[in-house]
């Protein structure tokens, strides 16, 4: 089905074979996103195997996200400056080297090095994937193509923890990386054969100061929010320093881009109102998605008493439905535009997060499955149409910058959504346990967690309402 859809949507240039090109890119992207969540299931095994603390082990996730947050913002410059094939081969080479290093790692620090190398490859690949879609598909087919990308990108992180759990149960954590390797090698060979150089190389000057400011800025923001959400809390000097440093660096980065002749990122993309609205909608949607992804497993384990594997299996249909509906909504976007989809998506998400703000220890797990599926459907109605419509307003020469901004926003909003959700949850728990007569009682702890989940979803409902208001101003871009 994928080959048929992409063949129908490819450009009139017979030398560009859309189906095999997209196959190579999507397989690579799937493995990158799969890796982002798969190793979470192995954290406890790694703590025991390497005799490390949970906070140290968490760097396997934080480090991966941090590198993505650093690499993706400069990807626009790299896409313009280097041939498509060379950039693809480079990204896959980093990914393959990273999984090999991680697969053979005898200690934690080599494993972390492998994760960082792999993240560099993924950080280069994701914007390249979005950019390639814009080049090889005409505007009236981009919704369908972006929907296929959404299917793969959402299905991968949804299946990662479950697949990794099965792999660990029957093999060991090393096998997570060895299973990925042949798929990456296949994608590399496929891309070398079929992927041509799609854009004209522009020998832009590399402004070192801009690269440094981008690295410190985006890296500091992602690092600060990630640590605040994981364990450190907002009062931590590390978190405060990272957020202040990141914010100052980003402000300086913006001024730098406006003052030099050949900026790393052309901020002209923000002159287009539909692009801005698409970015804002993406920000709101990802805060809701990542909030749900972190809150519901906690609720189902501590609030409903389910095992980790049972909670993962119950949430799996939501991720699968999100991927499928991304493709369906992409086709609807091509025919009817984004407005009805995005408005309907935020309206539906408002209802679903309202339901989650009312959950109790007696809430049926089956209702959780149904409403989580509805939440994922609603988010698929928002993300693909709003992003595609916004990018369609850009001039072709701004596509690399647009894709860099979109992918940076996805990573940053994910860190923000997770941090805010966990912070609200923790503050509510601490407040209720401080007032409890017996805060060590298991039932009291469970009720405090449930109240925290309710408050965090109330915040998500406010975000969804803001998204609904924003969606009223979206207009279809006809190219």
Image: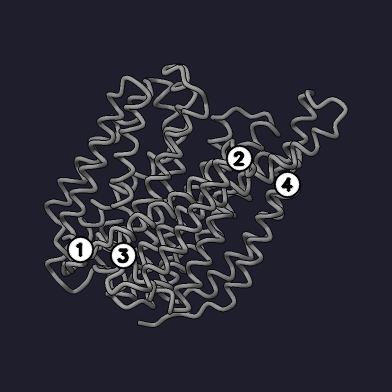
Q: Which residue is mark 3?
A: 264
Residue 209's x, y, as percent?
Answer: 32, 59
Residue sitting at 31 percent across and 72 percent down?
A: 260
Local SS, label 1: helix
Q: Quadrant of residue 462?
A: bottom right
Position of 442 relative to 451 (above/below): above
Local SS, label 2: loop
Q: Which residue is mark 4?
A: 454
On screen, residue 214 versus residue 21, left or right, reads: right
Report how far apart the C-alphas of labels 2 and 4 lie in the structure.
Answer: 25 Å
- Nearer the observer, disc 1 or disc 4? 1
Residue sitting at 46 percent across and 28 percent down?
A: 57
Of mark 2 and mark 3, the one earlier in the sequence is 2
Query: Which colour assignment does the render follow?
Result: one colour
Position of 112 relative to 402 (above/below): above
Q: Which residue is mark 1?
A: 81
Of mark 2 and mark 1, the one earlier in the sequence is 1
Q: Which residue is mark 2?
A: 236
Q: CB under 8 Å between callouts 1 and 3? A: no
At label 2, counting other C-alpha atoms closer than 10 Å, the crowd grade (few under 14, some 14-19, many 20 or more) is some
Front residue (pair 216, 344): 216
Residue 160's x, y, as percent?
Answer: 43, 38
Of mark 1 and mark 3, the one earlier in the sequence is 1
Report how far apart the C-alphas of labels 4 and 3 lie in the structure.
Answer: 42 Å
């Amino acid at each position: 089905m994928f080959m048929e859809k992409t063949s129908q949507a490819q450009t009139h240039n017979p030398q560009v074979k859309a189906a095999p090109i997209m196959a190579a890119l999507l397989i690579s992207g799937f493995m990158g996103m799969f890796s982002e969540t798969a190793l979470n299931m192995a954290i406890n095994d790694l703590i025991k195997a390497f005799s490390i603390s949970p906070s140290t082990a968490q760097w396997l996730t934080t480090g991966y996200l941090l590198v993505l947050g650093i690499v993706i913002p400069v990807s626009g410059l790299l896409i313009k400056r280097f041939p498509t094939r060379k950039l693809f081969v480079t990204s896959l080479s980093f990914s393959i080297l990273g999984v090999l290093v991680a697969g053979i790692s005898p200690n934690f620090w080599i494993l972390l090095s492998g994760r960082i190398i792999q993240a560099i490859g993924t950080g280069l690949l994701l914007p390249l994937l979005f950019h390639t879609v814009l080049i090889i598909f005409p505007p009236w087919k981009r919704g369908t193509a972006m929907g296929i990308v959404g299917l793969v990108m959402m299905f991968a992180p949804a299946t990662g923890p479950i697949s990794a759990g099965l792999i660990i149960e029957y093999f060991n954590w090393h096998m997570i990386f060895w299973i990925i390797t042949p798929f990456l090698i296949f994608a590399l060979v496929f891309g070398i054969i079929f992927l041509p150089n799609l854009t004209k190389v522009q020998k832009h000057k590399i402004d070192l100061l801009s690269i440094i400011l981008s690295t410190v800025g985006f890296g500091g923001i992602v690092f600060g929010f990630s640590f605040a959400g994981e364990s450190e809390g907002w009062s931590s000097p590390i978190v405060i320093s990272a957020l202040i440093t990141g914010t100052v660096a980003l402000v300086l980065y913006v001024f730098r881009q406006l003052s030099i002749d050949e900026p790393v990122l052309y901020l002209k993309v923000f002159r287009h109102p539909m692009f801005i609205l698409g970015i804002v909608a993406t920000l709101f949607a990802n805060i809701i998605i990542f909030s749900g992804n972190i809150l519901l497993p906690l609720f189902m384990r501590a609030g409903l008493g389910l095992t980790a594997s049972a909670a993962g299996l119950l949430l799996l249909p939501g991720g699968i439905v999100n991927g499928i509906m991304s493709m369906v909504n992409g086709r609807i976007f091509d025919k009817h535009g984004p407005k009805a989809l995005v408005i309907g998506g935020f309206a539906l998400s408002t209802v679903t997060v309202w339901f989650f703000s009312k959950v109790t220890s007696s809430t049926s797990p089956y209702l959780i499955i149904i409403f989580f599926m509805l939440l994922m459907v609603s988010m698929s109605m928002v993300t693909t149409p709003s992003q595609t419509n916004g990018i369609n307003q850009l001039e072709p020469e701004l596509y690399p910058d647009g894709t860099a901004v979109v992918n940076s926003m996805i990573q940053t909003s994910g860190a923000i959504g997770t941090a805010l959700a966990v912070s609200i949850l923790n503050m509510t728990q601490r407040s209720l346990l401080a007032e409890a007569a017996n805060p060590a009682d298991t039932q009291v702890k469970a009720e405090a967690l449930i109240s925290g989940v309710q408050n965090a979803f109330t915040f998500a409902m406010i975000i969804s309402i803001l998204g609904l208001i924003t969606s009223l101003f979206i207009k279809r871009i006809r190219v």
